[in-house]
């Protein structure tokens, strides 16, 4: 997927107001990246493909955007801000780093996103329960389940993008926790995948 294709893919899935705000958000990320490393500088020329479209694809995998979403380790707002602008029900972003929390709050205020909030904390300290949990390249699946298992319900869907398709011993780890999972290929990169789990780990 090229940058032009990524922008067209995003534009086909959001309304004009959301698209305009996503464009403003992209500009904010690029500007802030000069002060703190929100995304790898090498990905700025492909920010729509590597970050925006990559984030937005999670909306379709969730089966819709209603309910409460939790994005763990939101960093520069991918996927949290993008999904909030696309119209998910409630987006709670969990981010322990103060400067990134300040940036995310600035984005929420500047882009007028009433359905989004940021919690300055590690997920282990969060008491919110979510219908959908996302975490983009934050930690291994096993560590995420251990850290955030208290934030799910029996019907929670976990959407966990992975940088490359490498399951390793994931099947045995997930099955040992009584969960079902499957893997979808990313629409933005053929070597990347999204691990999808349902329910709560035991």
Image (cartoon, grey):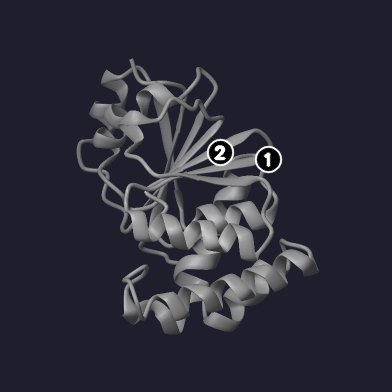
- Assess disc 2: are there few (<14), some (14-19) or many (≥20) residues with their C-alpha within 10 Å of its C-alpha: many
What quarter of the picture does the C terminus occupy? top left
Residue at 63%, 69% in the rendered image = 22
Task: Residue 157 in the image: state x and y as whole percent.
Answer: 51, 32
Q: Is residue 188 left or right of residue 108?
A: left
Residue that badge 2 annotates: 69
As helix, strand or loop, the secondary structure at mark 2 comes to strand
Instruction: Identify which residue, 104 or 193, lies in the foreground.
Output: 104
- Disc 1 is placed on an element classified as loop
Q: Is residue 54 above or below residue 151?
A: below
Q: Which mark is on residue 89?
A: 1
Q: Quadrant of residue 64?
A: top right
Q: Residue at x 31, y 49 (%)?
A: 138
Quarter location, residue 21: bottom right
Question: Could you tell whether 47 is left or right of 179 in the image?
Answer: right
Can residue 78 be seen here? The reply is no
Q: Which mark is residue 118?
A: none
From mark 2 to mark 1, how far is it between C-alphas? Answer: 7 Å
Q: Within the image, what quadrant is residue 82 found in?
A: bottom right
Q: Report whether 146 appears left or right of 12.
A: left
């Amino acid at each position: 997927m090229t940058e032009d294709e990524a922008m067209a893919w995003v534009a086909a899935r959001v309304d004009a107001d959301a698209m305009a705000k996503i464009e403003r958000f992209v500009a904010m990320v690029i500007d802030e990246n000069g002060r703190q490393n929100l995304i790898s500088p090498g990905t700025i020329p492909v920010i729509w493909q590597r970050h925006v479209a990559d984030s937005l694809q999670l909306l379709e995998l969730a089966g819709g955007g209603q309910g409460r979403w939790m994005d763990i380790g939101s960093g520069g707002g991918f996927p949290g801000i993008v999904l909030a602008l696309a119209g998910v029900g409630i987006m709670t972003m969990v981010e322990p780093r103060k400067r990134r929390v300040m940036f995310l709050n600035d984005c929420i205020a500047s882009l007028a996103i009433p359905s989004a909030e940021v919690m300055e904390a590690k997920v282990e300290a969060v008491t919110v329960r979510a219908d959908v949990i996302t975490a983009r390249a934050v930690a291994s699946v096993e560590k995420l389940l251990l850290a955030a298992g208290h934030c799910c319900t029996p019907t929670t869907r976990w959407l966990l993008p992975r940088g490359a398709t490498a399951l390793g011993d994931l099947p045995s780890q997930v099955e040992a926790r009584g969960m079902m999972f499957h893997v979808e290929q990313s629409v933005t990169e053929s070597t990347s995948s999204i691990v999808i789990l349902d329910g709560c780990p035991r």
